[in-house]
Image: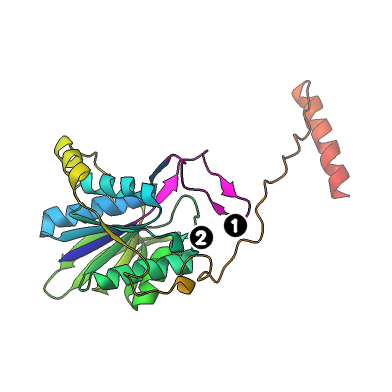
Amino acid sequence: MKVIVCIKQVPQTGTVKINPQTNTLIREGVESIVNPFDMYAIEEAVRLKERLGAKTFVITMGPPQADEALREALSLGIDEAIHLCDKAFAGSDTWATSLVLAKAIEKLQEFDLIICGKQASDGDTAQVGPGIAAHLNLAQATYVRKIDNIDVENKIIRLERLLEDGIEVLEVKMPALITVVKEINQPRLPSLRGKMRAKTQKITIWTHKDLGLKEEEVGLKGSPTQVVNIFTPPPRDKGMVFEGEPEIVVEKLLTELKKHLI
């Protein structure tokens, strides 16, 4: 069984910076972490490795510093890492990003399951996972909170999806893609042995040429969506503060509410 995890390195909250010329995130030189939801995807892949002997891969698309995210995944038990690193990828929207990841997965050839976090904390679109499935024409299940069973021989995975009004139980034919939520597991901490292995392990690097893609298919050129403008919302009005005895405060509040209702 071959399991592939797609992860993203994202800026630490509070350190997000925007390039005013391209309206894209500045990632170089910014303190970054593995996208929190992707940590649950990594953990689930490692559990499948421990349970079923799955061969595990981790893929990320990003600048040279994204190497750190891959090494963290390796330290947690993932077998091999692939870094999609190319200046041509800069500025890719969710469509172009999912295309690049899909091409990388195709290059790995046969696989059974792709696991992604439900969304990235810097974009919050939840589109890349489903986008990969669309490019590869795969069955997919989003917001997965539990993998009940995997029938390796018949290539069927039974799982639970977290919905707004309950839980959906379904069976999906593999190969397939799932996106996971935090309820699926509790990510582990890396062991000392894992950290030592990850520090020296070779990471495969692929560019757009390695994936058989043209420059106009990726990056800003290959992105059908564009950020037109980025701005900081104006500060909210502090509102009104009423002081005094409760009865007086209520009376003042009702008076103000009536003014706005008329």
Magenta stretch holds residue 121: no
Magenta stretch in the rendered image? 7-31
Image quadrant in which you'd find residue 171: bottom left
31 vs 121, nearest the viewer? 31
Point 85% across, 46% down: residue: 260
Identified by mark 1, the residue type is: Thr
Task: Decide: few, some or many residues near mark 1? Use Cα within 10 Å; few <14, some 14-19, many ≥20.
Answer: some
Q: Residue furthest top?
A: 244
Q: Which residue is mark 2?
A: 91
Q: Which residue is mark 1?
A: 22
260 vs 208, nearest the viewer? 208
Which badge, 2 or 1, comes first in the chain's sequence?
Answer: 1
Q: For residue 170, say whether it is visible.
A: no
209 vs 145, nearest the viewer? 209
For residue 119, side relative to residue 23 (left or right): left
- Secondary structure character of the magenta stretch overall: loop
Real-space Cα separation, disc 2 to disc 1, in angstroms: 8 Å
Disc 1 secondary structure class: loop
* Residue 239 location (% of width, % of height): 77, 35
